[in-house]
Image (cartoon, grey):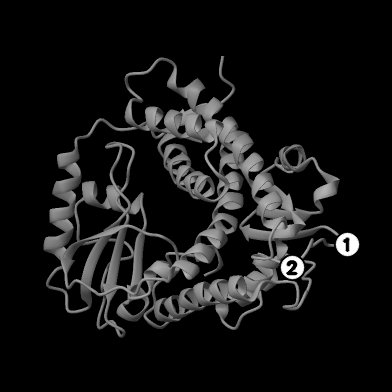
């Protein structure tokens, strides 16, 4: 008998349903003077589970009401498919440098093809290094909430697991392949693609969530050990003399503690109850979040306010190339955030949207 209840089961839909929604969205927005281009990023690998992740590339100044936030112009079928995903909104000047956020894959659906600057091999290395620290703790945190909650949103859980799989592939590229990661990614693909055919999928989903959390902590530990052997992140070993917490978003916390204190996963599990959820990671990763919080702009200011106690560690322990790449990433997000704010959008950041 499972202790959880379940909702939002995967739907039985075909790939053609997604094609129909794409056509509807293009017809609705292709003649809008504000929309320079519509891109889709990611892929529909599991119809009925996958959502549509769209990027609306807009003029610097939006005229009139665009109606992208709530998609009031489209059918309920299109609305559900897109609003379950992410509608990113950015000006051309940010999209031109989108690959400095992450190694993203995107396809033009409508409008003008925009030339995108490509990072150097050196920049690409640091972008991937930083993306691991941006994403893996946050994904572990979401998975922890799902496993600790009484009710599991199945489709959402499968989407988060799929995204987590991308982070594991990043880590495989840095650390070398892991058989445990490989088997987890295969199980995620089976659950997403064959939900209606496999036996007892709910129980397998819960087991998969638990395994993903285990693997996430394990690979993050291995990543720290690798970084400690080089100076590409921080110089030497870094520790804090006290535990620090950052509220990533409402009632979801990252706690930093020294590696020799151990028990990260067990502590996070014990702390996660009564509507508050935790991921506990090594204080070795605090400099990454310090760099993000120590910049100019509304996103960095929001981060600083969420760190308790806020510890200013200066720049001396941090590799300059790593810091510069991370500063550029949050700087691009700040430009995007200012654009959204000036055009009265409530959301739409491709990165660091928790702090907008």
Disc 2 and disc 1: Cα gap in Å?
A: 18 Å
Q: Position of residue 141 (x, y in %)?
A: 61, 47
Q: Position of residue 266 (x, y in %)?
A: 75, 37
- Please determine whether, in this image, residue 295 is positioned above or below residue 243: below
- Please determine whether, in this image, residue 34 is positioned above or below residue 354: below
Is 217 left or right of 40, judged from the image as shown? right
- Residue at x 28%, y 68% (from the top left corner): 56
Quadrant hosting residue 29? bottom left
Residue under numbered circle 2: 235
Q: Position of residue 69 (x, y in %)?
A: 33, 65
Mark carried by residue 241:
1
Is 313 left or right of 99, judged from the image as shown? right
Q: Position of residue 79 (x, y in %)?
A: 26, 52
Helix, strand or loop under label 2: loop
Within 10 Å of the Cα at label 2, are there few (<14), some (14-19), or many (20+) other Cα atoms? some
Within 10 Å of the Cα at label 1, are there few (<14), some (14-19), or many (20+) other Cα atoms? few
On the question of residue 146 being in view, the answer is: yes
On the question of residue 150 being in view, the answer is: no
């Amino acid at each position: 008998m499972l202790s959880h209840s379940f909702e939002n089961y995967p739907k039985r839909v075909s790939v053609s349903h997604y094609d129909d929604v794409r056509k509807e969205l293009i017809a609705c927005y292709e003649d809008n003077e504000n929309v320079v281009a519509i891109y889709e990023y990611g892929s529909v690998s599991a119809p009925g589970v996958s959502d549509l992740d769209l990027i609306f590339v807009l003029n610097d100044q939006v005229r009139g009401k665009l109606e992208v936030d709530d998609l009031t112009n489209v059918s309920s079928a299109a609305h559900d498919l897109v609003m379950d995903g992410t509608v990113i909104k950015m000006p051309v000047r940010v999209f031109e440098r989108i690959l400095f956020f992450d190694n993203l894959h995107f396809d033009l659906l409508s409008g003008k093809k925009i030339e995108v600057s490509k990072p150097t091999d050196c920049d690409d290395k640091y972008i991937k290094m930083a993306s691991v620290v941006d994403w893996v703790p946050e994904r572990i945190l979401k998975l922890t909430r799902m496993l600790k909650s009484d009710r599991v949103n199945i489709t959402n859980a499968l989407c988060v697991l799929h995204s987590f799989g991308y982070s594991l592939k990043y880590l495989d590229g840095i650390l070398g392949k892991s058989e445990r990661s490989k088997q987890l990614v295969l199980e995620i693909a089976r659950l997403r693609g064959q939900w209606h055919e496999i036996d007892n999928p709910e129980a397998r989903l819960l087991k998969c969530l638990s395994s993903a959390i285990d693997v996430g902590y394990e690979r993050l530990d291995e990543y720290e050990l690798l970084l400690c052997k080089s100076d590409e992140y921080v110089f030497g070993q870094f520790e804090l003399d006290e535990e620090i917490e950052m509220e990533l978003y409402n009632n979801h916390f990252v706690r930093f503690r020294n590696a020799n204190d151990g028990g990260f996963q067990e502590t996070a599990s014990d702390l996660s109850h009564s509507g508050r959820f935790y991921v506990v990671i090594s204080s070795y990763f605090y400099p990454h979040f310090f760099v993000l919080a120590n910049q100019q702009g509304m996103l960095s200011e929001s981060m600083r306010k969420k760190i308790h106690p806020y510890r200013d560690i200066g720049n001396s322990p941090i590799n300059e190339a790593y810091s510069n790449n991370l500063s550029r990433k949050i700087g691009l997000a700040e430009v995007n955030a200012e654009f959204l704010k000036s055009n009265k959008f409530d959301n739409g950041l491709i990165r660091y949207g928790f702090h907008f």
